Each structure stands twice: as structure tokens, then as C-alpha cells.
């Protein structure tokens, strides 16, 4: 979240169930994941739906950005981008190359 905050200032953090979601000063909804790898699963689909509902509630047609410390699977990237989300992976240098 700190690295994301440097480029997109975060105004507040809200909880989506038990998961912290950042809301940037410009209204962007930011999902920051410190995971080595993320894939498209039924759980990811449900979570994505919940994030989209949160963005819709903002009333600003908020953009959603997903940042992952590791790697995003091709299918996950495709599904998120198809929903209009921005996806950035490998945000934190680590053992994955």
C-alpha cells in the first residue's frame, strides 16, 4: 500500500468483509495484494463482484485498480481487464523473475 500511495495518494481504507481496500483521493478503488501469485477462481470472481459493488456505491463511477506484489495469471488479468479494472503485478521485487 505504501508504494501505491506514493503514486496514487490514498485518502482512506475501508473494509470489504475482513479485507482492507484503499480509496484514493481521486476516488479510485485500490485492491493491494501481497501474494506471490493470483489466479482466477470462483472466490476471485465473488470478490471481484464485491469490489465492483463497492466502486458503484462511491457514486463517482470509481475506477478499480488491482496491485499485486507477485504475478497475476493470464486468465485473472483478462477477467479483471474485461471488467474495466487496471491490473499491475510484480510491484515488489522478490524471488519471482
Image (spheres, grey):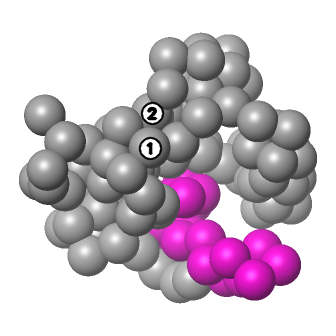
Q: x%, y% of residue 49?
A: 86, 45
Foreground mark, 2 or 1? 1
Q: In the image, residue 25 lies at what x, y percent?
A: 46, 69
Residue 61 falls within the magenta-colored stretch: no
Sort mark 2 into few (<14), some (14-19) or many (20+) by Cα contacts within 10 Å: many
Badge number at residue 72 = 2
**Residue 7, quarter of the rendered image:** bottom left
Q: Foreground: 38 or 14?
A: 38
Specify whether 21 is left or right of 11: right
Label 1 near label 2: C-beta < 8 Å?
yes
From what the image shows, is residue 80 above or below residue 42? above
* Mark 2, secondary structure of its residue: strand
Left or right: 44 in relation to 73: right
Q: Position of residue 35 (x, y in %)?
A: 43, 57
| Tag of residue 87 | none
Q: Is residue 6 left or right of residue 73?
A: left
Circle nearer the N terminus (2, 1): 1
Q: Which residues are magenta?
A: 14-31
Q: Residue at x 81, y 60 (%)?
A: 54
Q: Callout 1: 10 Å neighbours few (<14), some, many (20+)? A: some
Image spot of residue 64 (x, y percent): 59, 45
Tell me if residue 56 can be seen: no
For the image shown, how many numbered marks are present on the structure? Answer: 2
| Magenta stretch, main secondary structure class | strand
Whether residue 27 appears in this view of the structure is yes
Residue behind mark 1? 37
Horizontal arrangement in the rendering, residue 18 relative to residue 12 (left or right): right
Residue at point 53%, 71% (across, down): 22
Q: Quadrant of the C terminus?
A: top left
Spatial CA distance of label 2 from label 1 is 6 Å
Amino acid at each position: 500500500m505504501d508504494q501505491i500511495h506514493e503514486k496514487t495518494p490514498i485518502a482512506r481504507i475501508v473494509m470489504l468483509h475482513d479485507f482492507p481496500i484503499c480509496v484514493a483521493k481521486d476516488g479510485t478503488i485500490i485492491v493491494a495484494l501481497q501474494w506471490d501469485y493470483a489466479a482466477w477462481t470462483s472466490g476471485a470472481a465473488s470478490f471481484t463482484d464485491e469490489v465492483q459493488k463497492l466502486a458503484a456505491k462511491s457514486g463517482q463511477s470509481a475506477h478499480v485498480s488491482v496491485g499485486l506484489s507477485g504475478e497475476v495469471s493470464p486468465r485473472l488479468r483478462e477477467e479483471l481487464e474485461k471488467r474495466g479494472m487496471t491490473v499491475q503485478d510484480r510491484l515488489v521485487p522478490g524471488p519471482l523473475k
